[in-house]
Image (spheres, grey):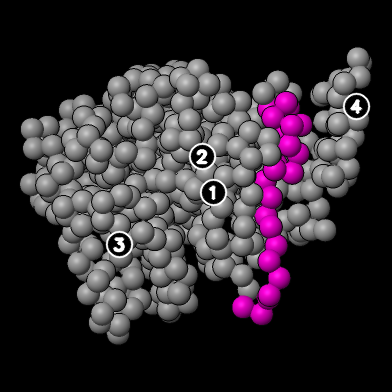
Amino acid sequence: MRYITLFALVLLLACKTDKKAEVPTGIVEKDSTKIVKLHTPDALLGGLFAEVQLKQVFEDGKTFVDCTAKYPYETIRKNYAAQKMDSDFDLKAFVLNHFEVPPSVTSDFKSDPTRSAAQHVEALWPVLQRKSDLAIDGSTLITLPSPYIVPGGRFREVYYWDSYFTMLGLAESGKFDIITDMLDNFAHLIQTVGHIPNGNRTYYITRSQPPFFSQMVALLAKYEGDAIYEKYKVALRKEYEFWMEGQNATDAPIKHCVSTPSGIMNRYYDLGDTPRQESYREDYELVQKMKGGAKMYRDLRAGAESGWDYTTRWFADGKTMETIETTDILPVDLNALLYGLEAVLTRCYSNDEAFVATLKTSMNNRKDFLEDYAWNSEDKVFEDYNWVKQEQTKIKSLATVYPLFFNMATQEQADGVAAYIKQHFLKPGGLPATLNHSGQQWDAPNGWAPLQWMAIKGLDNYGHSDLAKTIAERWVGLNEKVYANSGKFVEKYNVEDMTLEAGGGEYPVQDGFGWSNGVYLALKAYLKK
């Protein structure tokens, strides 16, 4: 039996060890009449999975879910049941006997100190590239038909929103074949799974990530022409349908869709309401501590779908994870991204008058929503909106630049955002994700490559080129300083104190690193212009 298949209709989730949660439906190949279940590690391993994760056999919970089973899962379960009560039972030894542990992607790569930072990044592309996948029994990997770039470190698979920012650098390197391959893979996932998962692992399939697929298509079309829009138009529309499933919601929200006076807006949402597979212990212990339940698990999972896992943007008290309420929030960045997707779809389907009219109505609704509900007229920034409490969250974050990136803001609003960023966000190494020092990785003092890019391009769109250039110079300088000291490009950076590493989060700082590499090359080209 093949445990991994792309033609999946059903995902089984274990609530604790055996209880099944809500299951998502996918798209099956047209010629196929066979329904195959796509299982996740907790469903396949039952009590063994929970024990391994809760007892922290591996320091990082993602290590176990990325292991490959050496034997059929039924055999492993039986062996565990037969041996676990033995007085000399060694759980870690059992796991190592029954599973192959995955390596880190860049663990054996040695940087050459004679190379410039740009040359180092160019040398890393082959290291981070994966060939098309072969199905392997006992693996959680969802196979992809074409090559792709992974971020690096613990991130051994493709990641959705990372890939757009990685592609910015690939384009500067002239690697359009691999960009095309990655777009083909994402289109394949949309057609077979029904959406682009967080990453190509079975345990990620209940959620997506910030919808940048349309921007990837637009990026390649910039270099290869409008035929690219035609090639991916069906996949783009299907992705839109995934995010807009439930758009007829009225009183109660349905999945990603929430009805507002301005029309349907979107939130982050995960079909699962159990601990995340890759962070099982962290989620389980937090929810047990708070006596939370399915809603709290879903809020944790939705925070992971946002890509900002985690940040005070999602916390009711603006400080602590214990108050997470992600699904109650209509994020500025997500609704701007969907505006961008709608804009690309109007181009792809210009001959479909009815669909274009629907899209334009939604685009106008999103601008109205930002104006009426997300715009903080006192501080002159965009803020996330809590649709349950019917108020802004009061958390200042770089999500405020997304409406500028997509040209949704007025000039007056853009001027306000620019002034606020210059006064409050601009640091020696660039821009932090928020102004809150919470210990979470998507808060101060950490800066992230994708947010620098969105801010720089957004500010440029409205004539704030000097500020954009300053941000780019400071970020590039920080990247080069860290590379000179460590020989690495890393996932995130401390923009406030350039002598310190970034921190926070559920795992150590990762090196590699796909989107940092991509944005660095793109900003070097930007500064030359």
Query: Disc 3 or 1, which lies upstream in sequence?
Result: 1
The reply to whether residue 3 is in sight is yes
N-terminal label among 4 and 1: 1
Position of residue 13 measured from the top left corner of the image (x, y, whole percent): 62, 44
The dot on residue 83 is: 4
Residue 179: image location, x then y, percent: 53, 62
Name the residue at 34% across, 47% down. Answer: 267
Q: Residue at x 10, y 50 (%)?
A: 411
Q: Which mark is residue 22?
A: 1
Mark 4 or mark 2: which comes first in sequence? 4
Residue 272 belongs to magenta span: no
Task: Find residue 273 and name its label.
Answer: 2
- Name the residue carrying label 3: 248
Please tell me whether mark 4 sits on a helix, a strand or a loop. helix
Q: Residues within 10 Å of mark 1 (few under 14, many from 20)?
A: some
Q: Dots 2 and 1: beta carbons under 8 Å? A: yes
- The secondary structure type at the circle numbered 2 is loop
Considering only order in the chain, which callout, 1 or 2, is on the residue closer to the N terminus?
1
